[in-house]
Image: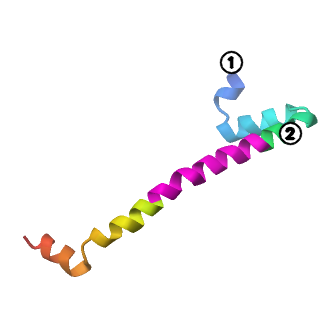
Amino acid sequence: MSYDKSEETMSKRELIARELDRLPEQDLDRLLSFLWSLKEAHVEATVPMLAAESALSKDWLTPEEDAAWGNL
């Protein structure tokens, strides 16, 4: 993908907005589905991390234990 000089100073969001304005109406449904799939992939990636955090929280030190370790 090549950019002209004016595009070098634009943020990615600005570039995407500009390209969005140029996109034919019939492609907007496909784009929206793709964006939703990206969002869903990020949500699914965080679920195992949250589950692991919950399981590991049993092994975390209590504030008292944490303070005791800091005094060693």
Rendering colour mode = rainbow
| 52 vs 62, nearest the viewer | 52
Does the rendering let one see residue 48? yes
Label located before the other in sequence (2 or 1): 1
Image quadrant where residue 18 sits: top right
The residue where tag 1 is placed is: 2
Image location of residue 8, percent across then percent down: 64, 27
Disc 2 element: helix
Image location of residue 43, percent across then percent down: 59, 54
Disc 1 element: loop
| 65 vs 9, nearest the viewer | 65
22 relative to 35, above or below: above
41 relative to 64, above or below: above
Q: Which residue: 65% across, 49% down? A: 39
Q: Is residue 37 magenta?
A: yes
In-image side of 25 versus 31 (left or right): right
Does the rendering let one see residue 11? no
Q: Residues within 10 Å of mark 2 (few under 14, many from 20)?
A: few
Farthest residue to the left: give it: 72
Image quadrant where residue 19 sits: top right
In-image side of 49 versus 20 (left or right): left
Q: Is residue 21 magenta?
A: no
The residue where tag 2 is placed is: 28
Q: Quadrant of the C terminus?
A: bottom left
Image quadrant where residue 29 sits: top right
Span highlighted in magenta in the image: 33-49
